[in-house]
Amino acid sequence: MTFAADYFDGHTTRAHRVTLSIDAGDLVMVGKGIARRESLSALRVSEPMGVAPRLITFRDGTHCQVAADALPPVFAKTLVVRMQESWRAAAASVVVAALAVVAAYVWGLPAFAAWIANRVPASIQAEIGDGTLQFLDARVFSPSALPATRQDELREAFRGMARSGNDRPQPYRVLFRDGGRIGANALALPDGTILMTDQLVGLAKTDEEILAVLAHELGHLERRHSLRMLIQGSIVAFAIGWYFGDLGGLVAAMPALMLQLRYSRGLEREADEFAATMMRANGVAPSRLADMLAKLDAAARRDRQEGAPDYLATHPATEERIRSLREM
Ligand SMILES: [Zn+2]
C-alpha cells in the first residue's frame, strides 16, 4: 500500500510531494528526484494529536508530514506504546520511579522542610518557643542554682563572642535552668531561646567549653535547624495544618516533639562549622567544643537515665564530631 506525504529535506522550507510505501520492514520514499529507503525501527513517529498531521522523522532530522488518517496501521504503535510493551523498559521505569521516590524522601523532604522553615511566621516560632519552655519548666526543669552574677558573666562573654564572629546575628537569649532528669544539656528553641542546664555548666572545666556549646546552639538557631527537624518529623500533620490554615494543634504538640528531636549528622556538622568559625574569630580553638563533647559523652555513659533524652541523643554523631572538631 502507498500513501502520500510532504517531505521536508531540511535544505529548503519547501515541501516535496512524495509517495511512501512499506516494504519488508522498510519505509520507501519516492518523489521527484527523491528515492530513499529507511528501516522502520530507525524512524520516529509523532504521537497522535487529534486531526493534526503526523510527523515521521528520519535519523538525519529530515521529516515527512502525513495526514493523520492516511498513516497505515504499522505506525499506530508509537514509541510510548512500544515502550509499554517492552518489559525491559517497563522494569526500568519502575526502578526509575522507585529511585525518584527515594530521592524525594532523602533530598526533597529536608529541602522542603528547610523551605517551609524559612517561611514560618515569627508568631508561630514564638508560640513553639514559649510552649516548649513552659512545658520544660513544668515537667523537667527547676530554677537555676547558678548565682545571677555567674549567669550574667556567661551571657556577657557569649554576647561578645557572638557579635564578633557573626555579621548578622539572630536575636537570641540565653537562659539557665537546673536540668533535672535531662542532666547536662543545652537546646535551642525556634524563637531564639538557648537553654543551658546548670549540670552542663558544672561539667565544663573552662568557660570556653561552655561558650563553645552556646556557639553550636546558636548555629542551630541561625540555620533554623530545630524548625526544620520539627517540620520534617511531622510533615504530614504540618501539610494538613498549613492547608487548612490551622497550625494550632500542631504547635501544641511541638514542645513534646522538641525533646525527641534528633538533628541529622549534616545539621550537626553545619552547627559545628558555624561554632568553629565564631570561636576562631575570637581566638578560641574549635577543639574546646570537642573537649566538651567528650565530657558530655562520659557523663551520659555514667548516668544515663531511662527515657531521658541526653544532649548527645539530640546532637548525634559524637565521635565523628570530636574527630573533625579537633582537626579544624
Ligand atoms: Zn547540635
Image (cartoon, rainbow, N blue to C red):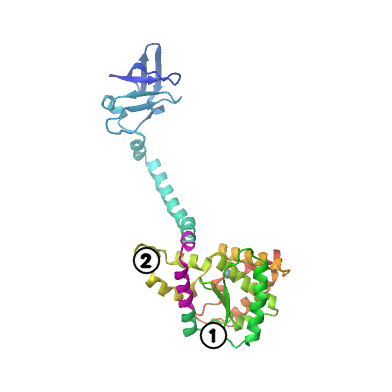
Please tell me whether mark 2 sits on a helix, a strand or a loop: helix
Q: Which mark is residue 180?
A: 1
Q: Residues within 10 Å of mark 2 (few under 14, many from 20)?
A: some
Majority SS type along the magenta span: helix
* Ligand 1 within 8 Å of the CB at mark 2: no
How far across and how far down the image is residue 134, in percent? 47, 81
Please identify, in this view, whether the residue under mark 1 or under mark 2 is nearer the observer. Answer: 2
215 w.r.t. 91: above or below? below
Q: Residue furthest right?
A: 283
Residue occupying the point 40% across, 17% down: 36
In the shown orientation, is residue 180 left or right of residue 123? right
Residue linked to disc 2: 241
Please tell me whether mark 1 sits on a helix, a strand or a loop: helix
- Amino acid type, residue under disc 1 in the picture: Gly
Assess whether mark 2 and mark 1 are in contact (beta carbons under 8 angstroms): no
Ligand 1 shows up in the quarter that is bottom right
252 w.r.t. 43: above or below? below
- Amino acid type, residue under disc 2 in the picture: Gly
Residue 254 counted in the magenta span: no
Residue 123 counted in the magenta span: yes
56 w.r.t. 151: above or below? above
- Whether residue 181 can be seen here: yes
108 w.r.t. 142: above or below? above
The answer for how far apart the CA atoms under marks 1 and 2 are is 33 Å
Of residues 296 and 197, the one drawn nearer to the viewer in this rendering: 197
How far across and how far down the image is residue 260, in percent? 48, 73
Span highlighted in magenta in the image: 115-132
How far across and how far down the image is residue 221, in percent? 55, 68
Q: Residues within 10 Å of mark 1 (few under 14, many from 20)?
A: some
Say which quadrant the C terminus sits in: bottom right
Residue occupying the point 41% across, 49% down: 97
**Residue 40's quadrant in the figure?**
top left
